[in-house]
Image: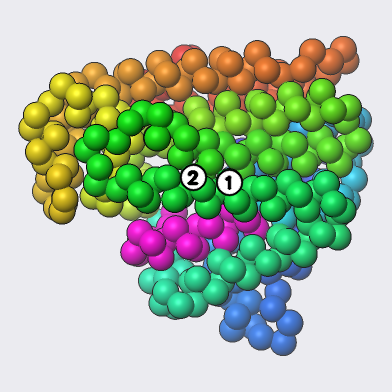
Amino acid sequence: MITEQLPAAFPCMAADLDRLRDRMADTRQVEGRPDLTEIVGHLLDGVPKLVRPGLALMSAYIAGDPQRPVPDSVIEAAVAVEHVHVGTLCHDDVMDEAATRRARQSVNARWENSMAILSGDYHLGTAAIMAARLGPATSTIIAELFQTLCRGQMIETVDRYNVNRSEESYMESIRGKTATLLSSSARLGALHASADADVIDAVARFGIEFGIAFQINDDVLDLTRSEAELGKPPGNDIFEGVYTLPVLRTIRGSTELHDLLSPPVTRTEATRAIELVVASGAIEEAAVLGRGWFESAIRSLPSLPGREQQIEALIAFARDLLMTLPYPVVSA
């Protein structure tokens, strides 16, 4: 996660990330029950990049003093958002019947569905308690995040195996499921660094638009990477009936793909579907759209005298996360 530009722009970031990890270790503890602590902490151990908390920290440095450690409230807010993120992953894996998560056993595979659901609920409850202690503004942001995440997942779920799914439905879903988490992280970081309202809104808008580019990137990876790289079978979205942007673009001109994706979809059909999507040029089309969202995200960042180095480092951080495709969302 730490690029070459980050230490110079954010000299306290490594130490602040250590503070954040320590706080996450505290909040994963289920008092008197090491067996439950292991379950709750399972996915927290599997999020090494800390993208969302990192965005909260960088937003706080941009809004506050980049030469000083962030206030404790920024750490608390960043950890709260990560608990929301991990809680939703527990629930997602139950819904998807996933056996792995980032090349590790999923909670449901190791401890069964009921415990995975309860673990997800525990993470969400932890986030709510932390937010309440930070005050009404943070509680509202976290509560709205809960609702928006659920709405995005509901939109995706109602369209499973829908070969006529619209791109508008896809965009609405990824805005709710992915982009809002990044936006809330940035908003909370700036808020707890006592930023002006226009700066808070600007970094939150960056989070939304970068988050959309990030999810388009992830959806393309699902079609272009190996199982070893993904930690799950390629084309898993197709197999589960979640038809993402490159698939939707290909369906419009491919009767074969349209017919293949009528439910149920087998692994063999999902593999053939990937071949059709890659051959269609839709991967490149998705990259162009994602690049547009990323460029819009950059334009949304505030112009703050004396913070040019920090803003450039934030852009570099985001660009590095997207430079993973055969047709990358962000050009080199």
Instruction: Give the numbered dot on residue 148.
Output: 1
> Is residue 201 shown above or below 165?
above
* Relative horizontal placement of residue 198, taking residue 225 as reference (left or right): right
At label 1, the amino acid type is Thr
Instruction: Give the numbered dot on residue 317.
Output: none
Give x and y (percent) for residue 284: 32, 18
At label 2, the amino acid type is Gly
Give x and y (percent) for residue 319: 56, 24
Give x and y (percent) for residue 163: 22, 38
* Relative horizontal placement of residue 100, taking residue 321 as reference (left or right): left
| Label 1 Cα neighbours within 10 Å, binned few <14 / some 14-19 / many ≥20 | some
Is residue 189 found inside the magenta-colored segment of the image? no
Residue drawn at point x = 20 percent, y = 24 percent: 252
Residue drawn at point x = 33 percent, y = 36 percent: 244
For the question of whether residue 140 can be seen, the reply is: yes
> Is residue 178 shown above or below 216?
below
Give x and y (percent) for residue 301: 71, 19
Q: Are marks 2 and 1 in contact (CB under 8 Å)?
A: yes
The quarter holding residue 96 reads bottom left
- The residue labelled by disc 2 is 152
Q: State the extent of the magenta-drawn residues as a range.
A: 82-102
